[in-house]
Image (cartoon, rainbow, N blue to C red):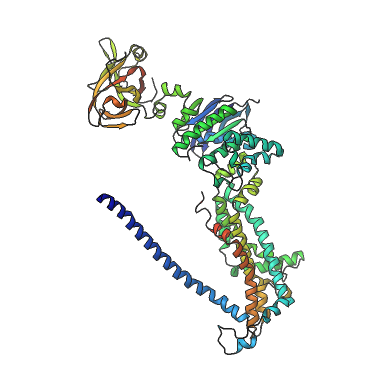
Amino acid sequence: MLMADVALRKVVKRYDDVEAVRGIDLDIADHEFIVLVGPSGCGKSTTLRMIAGLEDISDGDIMIGGDVVNDVPPKDRDIAMVFQNYALYPHMTVAENMSFGLRLKHYPKAEINARVTEAARLLDITDLINRKPKQLSGGQRQRVAMGRAIVRNPKVFLFDEPLSNLDAKLRVQMRIEIKKVHQKVRTTTVYVTHDQVEAMTLADRVVVMNKGRIEQIGTPNELYHKPATRFVAGFIGSPAMNFIPCRLEDSGGKLNIRLTDRISFPLPPARAARYNALPRTDRLQLGIRPEHLTESNAHLEAGVETFDTVLDVTEPMGMETLVYFGLEGTPVCGRVNPNAGAKDGAPMRLAMDLNNMHLLNEETGVVL
Amino acid sequence: MSTLVIDKAGPTRKLGSMSRDRTWALRWSYFFLVLFAIFFLTPPAYMLITSLKSSAEISAATNPWWVYHPTLSNYVELLTSNQFLRFFFNSSMISIIVVIVTMLISIPAAFALARMKFWGSTTLATGVFLTYLIPDSLLFIPLFKMLAVIQEFTGITLLNRWYVLVFIYPTLTVPFCTWIMIGYFASIPKELDEAAIIDGASWLQTLLRIFIPVALPGLIAATIFAFTVSWAQFLYPLVFTTSIDQLVLPVGITTTLIKGDVFNWGQIMTGALLGAAPPLVIYAFLMDYYIAGLTAGATKG
């Protein structure tokens, strides 16, 4: 088996004066499933298209399997791509769509048939093999598009927002389908999406991009629990992390975090040690996820502090209730047990788990 | 209970007024369609009536809208006349060759202009269309001069030969066909050729195996247009061909069947009807494709 690792070295994409991608370094291991995620215009699709060879590279190098492919045309890069709008050839049947690439390369008929049959079986589209794309549903078209990629047995799969055109339910289903396929074929995959849930659920490692740069690379859990920047902290997770302006204070030999005139908590020892060196004058933000803002109960762990507030709005979600309130004008979201009695406009005692807090520099957005 | 009644009455009334609107819209459209149909079908109907009459009946002061002694003699005479068959042959040859030449130029040109972004491609696309806007009545004298010069230098006889029109007509058909096919090719999603490129197709393979099959309705529309323009062209053949055996149908009918101030109306009408038949047959067969071609890009993304 050929090595199919992909490496990007200081890759830049310039359109006239605008830099869409500003110097990206990325190493993708053989068999790895990498997801590029970020808001629209962050350069993730451009990066993918540069790997595919559909866009020229303005600067830097792209390597596939150890070879620099900057000037190699797409067809010689041994990649396959799945597009957002499927891009199936409308005048060909499913089988013809899937075999088009192999037929262009003059593979023997028997082998083409074998590969198409195998891919169709893998994707559960054997019954559809003689249909035209317009006779298929969105999910089925997406499967055919994946089948077209699989039969080529390429070094790298490239997915460009493949599930964006599907409805929510089908998206979840196809997400699992893609994961299953990857577990079976184990081809190195680069997957672009703007949906952080897709990124978290599919990826071995997630690359969070913003404004043409990589904000952070890590496993889904690393990104969730140890975000490097405010952007990553706010982008990953739903509902998003709360950011509350705060400052550090020394009080009675302990390091405290003050949120409002009224609310100030002592930091847990581990956190206090970590933040002790920071100047007390810095403008800081407390980053806390909604699940670490819950109803107060009788047995509080160390580092969990309570405060009283008045709820603005509550959103019962079934397995939990989201509560919204304000801390000196900053909107904050918490997640409480549906039986905790949260009501619109009612006062409530909440508990903040400071063991899972993040402290950010307000100006630089860096997580400290 | 009462709210239920109101809920039911609301949408029903709305639906009623909508269908009433629709009924009136349909009535008006039928009214105007019938009006237009009468207006445009009267001349061919008159041609058909006249073509079935003998010369004597045409010149007699009978009801012009009725045939008292129908005869096929005009048809028999024309279809057995070598001259008329020659016109028909010339017209057919020219139109078929022009259609082929037009397609061979227009399809690659449209593909290049629609897909290969190169310096000045947009300007060139507009330029192609602008050439179509120059009327042939302005072009025939310079063209005649040009051909005369070429004939003089090369010694190849071009003027007064039917095949010269094969070189002239594409100046009319190529710009328009290129233009409508640029529009048609542009409506094909970009991802489709990107998928083909990644599948390993060259530009030519993308054109032949993806673009032409997908854009087939547009190609057929362009083909029909090119055929109709070549078939019905009058000014250029009138100018560039003079010998009887080099004439095309429209010019042949008017020059041979009108002798001085004697109009052989029966045969003129018969010839015109027979001449109108091939485009009519082609339209009838390819109408669905033609309409799909004209509305390309309106529905499919």
* Count of numbered circles on the image: 0
Foreground residue, B269 or B121? B269
- Give percent across and percent down for residue B132: 58, 62
- At 67% from the left and 35% from the top, the residue drawn is A114
Q: Is residue A124 left or right of residue A330?
A: right
Determine which quarter of the picture holds residue A68: top right
- Give percent across and percent down for residue A245: 30, 25
- At 33% from the left and 54% from the top, the residue drawn is B11
Residue lying at the far right of the rendered structure: B155
- Give percent across and percent down for residue B104: 67, 56
**From the viewer's perspective, is residue A145 above or below residue A254?**
below
Determine which quarter of the picture holds residue A80: top right
**From the viewer's perspective, is residue B128 above or below residue A58?**
below
Q: Is residue B197 visible?
A: yes
Q: Is residue A317 left or right of residue B61?
A: left
- Give percent across and percent down for residue B10: 30, 54
Q: Is residue A284 visible?
A: no
Foreground residue, A55 or B6? B6
Foreground residue, A258 or B284? B284
**From the viewer's perspective, is residue A361 above or below residue B131?**
above
Foreground residue, B203 or A121? A121
Residue lying at the far front of the rendered structure: B1
Residue lying at the far bottom of the rendered structure: B61
**From the viewer's perspective, is residue A150 above or below residue B239?**
above
